[in-house]
Image: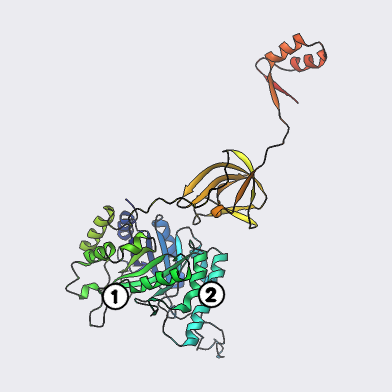
Amino acid sequence: MTQSIIGSNAALRYLKAYDAHVSYWREVNPAFQLAFVDKPEHTIYIEQYAQALPDSMIVARIYHPLDGGFHLAPTGTNPDGTPDTRHYVSSPAEYLSAYGWLGRKRNIILNVMNEPQSDASPDVMLRLVSWFIDYIPMAATSETKSVLFNWADRNPQIINGMMDSQFNNVLRLMAVHPNLFFMGMHFYGPDELTSHLDSYVARCKFLGVKPPRVIGTEFGIDSTGGIERGYKSRLNYKDIYAQWQETVIKGSLKPHIDSGVLAGLCVFQEGNSGGFEDFDFENDSAYKAEIKRAARADELSPSPPPITVPVYIPDPFTPNTMYKITMPADFVNVRATPSTLASKLGEVPNGAVILVMDETLLSDEYWRHINYNGLVGYISMQGGNVHLQYAPDNSPSTITIPIDLLVSIQTSLKKDYDMVTNIITSLTGGQSTSLG
């Protein structure tokens, strides 16, 4: 059973049956699952949730009334009554200081902002872009996995069939670190779901960058201008909600899922965090049974991708041999497993001599299993930028001679007779010694 594209947007503190919830999603095995809390002190529950679902990547969302406007200028006052003159409601550095530790956990991705306004004044839009241009290098330096923006359905603006060009530099920065940064989008039917995703892919193609993966941090049915809201308020969808989701996954969204651009869809909402009765599916047994059936039948997973081979051939090597490592950078990271998402164990500096034990080809990258002065782990060959040069071991050789052979030497050699006799008489039967 492969991982399901469908997961849950779970309001952790509002779930009525937490243990049953965890048991269910272990069976469904989603690639991504969103964990929502509405108090900073509840982040510990996100960490526990990630431990309970170790095979899923958990998107950590900490609600704040202004989490769609961290880039705005504060309008309030300080506790002493003076004006709040900070540049941002919450700066990138402040946000990372408070919550960045979550995105550095093995299977947690930090949710950064939620539904920022995409058609605001030029000044406000510039602030939004600048906020993320400041955030991305900071998060990259600390290796904080992040899902950015979390755009409202059909946002941001589409211009000439492409995503708004104001975000060009943000996309370029994200694309440099494809395993750290994801684009967050909300997908709501029953109307079409793909226009903003199509425009995003078109913009990335125009820029010549591989689209950073997209996580649908909210997915479901919502208002389209009428009085209806969630699926429970719609007679035409209440009983076929799971089937509708399966239809769009196998239909309009399938090209983006199979291409690897759309990585996960988190159904909103499981557990009612306030005012979302029409969306809450925690106790919808028929819906959940159908989703579990489809997931276990691998109907909610991407089609198997074609086997890809890296476009480069790494330096040849002999297993269990010493090599000198060279690269353009000052060091290469050592990981616990052959993945850039794996825990970092340490670093190997440029020019160091390492023991190379074996090789792994994962997706389109080569990894070498190495031992550097007792530091054992995996290093990426980084698209052919890391090189290995044979480094022979020049330490003196030691020859071990059995005692029976020394007796033969004593018999046949006359020169240095006393030296050999002394060696033999110091040994007991079955022992060996070394010369040289």
Could you say which disc has been placed on residue 133 in the image? 2
- Residue 193 occupies quadrant: bottom left
Residue 218 in picture, x, y percent from top left: 34, 70
Q: Of circles 2 and 1, which is in front? A: 2
**Amino acid type, mark 1:** Phe
The part of the image, by quadrant, that contains residue 275 is: bottom left
* Image position, residue 240 (x, y; %): 19, 66
Which residue is depicted at the point 67% across and 50% down?
A: 351
Question: Which of disc 1 and disc 2 is earlier in sequence?
Answer: 2
| Left or right: 86, with 68 as reference point | right
Image quarter where the C terminus lies is top right
Q: Amino acid under label 2?
A: Ile
Instruction: Name the residue located 81 percent from the left edge and 10 percent from the top edge.
Output: 414
Q: From the viewer's side, name the closer residue of 109 and 213.
A: 213
Label 2 crowd bin: few (<14), some (14–19), many (20+), radius 10 Å: some
Residue drawn 52% across and 55% down?
Answer: 343
